[in-house]
Amino acid sequence: MTVPQPQLENLYQEIILDHYRSPHHKGLREPYQVEVRHLNPTCGDEITLRVQLDDDVVSDVSYDSQGCSISQASASVLTDLVIGKPLSRATEVHEEFVRLMQSKGELEPDEDVLEDAIAFAGVSRYPARIKCALLAWMAWKDATAQALGSVTASNGGGDN
Amino acid sequence: MTYDVALVRKDFPILDREVRPGVPLVYLDSAATSQKPTAVLDAMRDYNEQHNANVHRGIHTLAEEATALYESARDKVAAFIGAPDRREVVFTKNSTEALNLMAHVLPFGPGDEVVITEMEHHSNLVPWQLACQRVGAKLRWIGLTDDGRLDLSDVDGLITSRTKVVSIVHQSNLLGTVNPIAEIAAKAHAVGATVVVDASQSVPHMPVDVSTLGADAIAFTGHKMCGPTGIGVLWARADLLESLPPFLAGGEMIDEVTMAGSTFAELPHKYEAGTPPIAQAVGLGAAIDYLTELGMDAVHAHEKQLTAYLLDGLSGVDGLRIIGPTSTERRGGAVSFVMDGFHPHDIGQLLDQYGVAVRVGHHCARPACLRYGIPATSRASLHLYSDTGDVDALVTGLGKVREFFG
């Protein structure tokens, strides 16, 4: 009997494996305004992520993480896509990525917005892995919200 | 009579299925839940088709039949674990509820201590954390050695006159380790502490006799012993349960109710508030008949032999490290492992492509994972229907991991 070859290409696209083997922007850096730590309680994956915002531009996102190839590659792609971008643009990318992850494989990803992140389209067909792909993105969203809050607070507060 | 696993497998229809065309199921996740033999499925169907009624209420024929079936399941459980008194067998939802029950009703207070271990499943850890916080008691734990055993070097410093409860797992779901219950129970009893044992992973795989185990109470669950989900068992010494207050309150657990107050039913009903899981009890009874017919000594011997084969197979996989004991001595058939450079999620996903079902993650035992400096493991776990073909498929699949992700 021949063992069937795995048909995992939809999930593990070569782009994902490349980012997993050689992650971009990995490591915790200074300066940063906020550091958050997020866990995936079902599998024990974790990420510590820092953000630095300057004049509504995402100056830096640095991170240290351990987890599966999907979560590692996702963090790497995230940093590629948001570092150096205006916050409004980065937020759009974030929203598009979340929409893709919730699409159950039904959405044609927008390559202009998502670039390498389109490789994660197949992940949305694997319910158990969506949280892996979203771990870094949720950490970034949380850290960014806190950074905006602290910037507002240091400017004398506000009730926005 | 020799144990014929090929014959046993015919009793489990699910083992014949393919997970996708041409890829047969290789089920190595029995520590999460076991598969059910036809006898269990038939018993539950027969109950629902022919005898369904509420128990302990009404005098019509169906109610009598349902009550007799439900209570005969209690007799079967009592006989299976050597309980001296059928009133000591309380049906719960699962092991977790049984352990929560004990954490709620056992008396301890400020300055008292509860001792658990670092290899507990969260179900035998978090209830004690909460109970200790509630009453101002202190939670202490027995640590682990590098080879996956309890570190008993300081056990006399941990179990002291302040200890009121010692609650420990019989067989670890993460490490597979079988713990020396009698030895620890003797120390606990010497200081007057009550001994609770999480037997979720031992009762389904080896003969367990509560009259010699050393525990005052044990918890286990139906769905890991070829029975259905939705039913668990608390066994506890009758004199202990009689001395303790109720847990869940409502119908069935009362004696006399007035608006001013209530008195409570005799054991075991005092701890069975509300309509119990009746069909599930019938299914559990059928599972116990099935296990008894195979013989738990034979089941245990089969699994021990296969665990040796599994450990041997895994030791030949490049870069693989077993988390837990590496011999079959005082260990069961749940084997956790990590592979350098490859995450359990990815390993599990690749194995699934070959039909091989393993569990990945921290297995609800995160502190033990932290102890070994790992976020997660892959775990292959055996049961009475597992065979060498299952292990071979696992080892073959693991051989592809480096090829795919490396």
Image: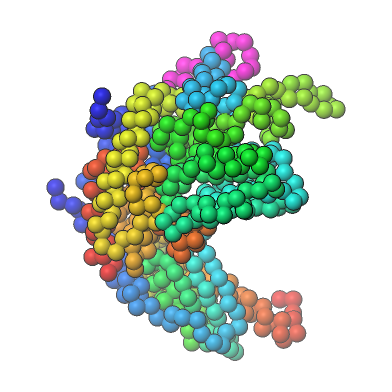
Is residue A153 shown above or below B63?
A: below
Query: Is residue B308 shown to the viewer in this render?
Result: yes
Toward the right, the furthest residue is B260
User: In which quadrant is the C terminus of chain B drawn?
Assistant: bottom left
Q: Residue A106 location, x and y as percent?
A: 39, 60
Q: What is the magenta range? A: B43-64
Q: Residue B313 location, x and y as percent?
A: 25, 51
At x 66% / y 83%, what residue is drawn?
A151
Relative side of B245 to B385, left or right: right
Residue B52 shown in magenta? yes
The image's colouring method is rainbow
At x 38% / y 29%, what residue is drawn?
B296
Q: Residue B197 location, x and y as percent?
A: 55, 40
At x 37% / y 50%, what residue is drawn?
B335
Residue B31 shown in magenta? no
**Count of all numbered marks drawn on residues in the image:** 0
